Image (cartoon, rainbow, N blue to C red):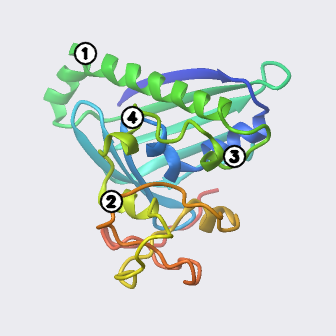
Amino acid sequence: MAEHHASVTVNAPVHQVYQLFTHFNDFPKFMSFVKEVTYYDDQSSHWVAEVAGHHEWDAINQNWLEDQRIGWVSTSGLKNSGRVTFRAPGPEQTLVDVFIDYDPPAGVLGNIGENLGVGSRFDAVLQHDLENFAEMVRQAPSGALDPTSSSYLFNPDSAAARGTTTDRQNATMADTTTDQDATEDYHPILDRDIIGESTPDAPAGRVPPTVPVDSPDSPPDTVGLPDPTERNIPRET
């Protein structure tokens, strides 16, 4: 597997940085190459990314330790695994290290492409979006634990601002003040459903009006994504 690494120092305490990073569903709102992160449940998710081609995979959480590290391994799609570590190099600072291993698609040809520059492109994009994360934290209120409080969301470089996010991602960013018709078929699971946050007063994002949205009076989401097939995967220890 090809191994890649990026790191950034964020000027915020470890607990805050850890909490902000684990809001995966918000990644497309400030990152450029991540087009979708949607949840099946609190342990498994679906990802779509655009780096040297279009790639999708399902992943399960692995080896999480609060305020220290998170990890994952893919269960279908692009074969990959990784971990993110958080440590304090100084007061009110957090060093974030991201390590990703993946099998280049197309077997031998993929390995050749990795050696001929695709890997370097991936490293550059990974570093760029990690720096986008640091900027998102910088523009969030002091002590904020939810990325939606940051003024850096929907920056011009983000996938959401450029309109390259998927329909499933868009559904999670639906403006709850818009037309509430056609909401029965799809109720996306959001960060607040998993983390237990209260429903925010303001909508978390912007999407075209054709995307189905959740009703503000509906009960908490209890169903997963319609495609790929739902699954319940045991918690990794």
Mark 1 vs 2, N-terminal side: 1
Q: Quadrant of residue 227?
A: bottom left
Q: Give the farthest residue toward the right.
A: 91
Q: Nearer the viewer, mark 1 or mark 2?
A: 2
Which circle, 4 or 3, is nearer the viewer? 4
- Residue at the (69%, 46%) spot, across then down: 19
Q: Is residue 29 above or below residue 224?
A: above
Q: Residues within 10 Å of mark 4 (few under 14, many from 20)?
A: many
Name the residue beneath numbered marker 3.
19
Find numbered disc 4 in the image and state the secondary structure of the residue it sits on. Answer: loop
Lower position in the chain sequence, tag 4 or tag 1: 4
Residue at image position (56%, 77%) is 216
User: Where's the N terminus, which quadrant?
Assistant: top left
| Real-space CA distance between mark 4 and mark 3, rounded to the nearest whole angstrom | 20 Å
In the rendered structure, the answer to whether residue 167 lies left or right of residue 11 reads left
Q: Label 3: few (<14), some or many (≥20) within 10 Å?
A: some
- Circle 3 SS class: helix
Residue under label 4: 32
User: Of circles 3 and 2, which is in front?
Assistant: 2
Q: Is mark 1 in CB contact (under 8 Å) with mark 3?
A: no
Residue, disc 2: 208
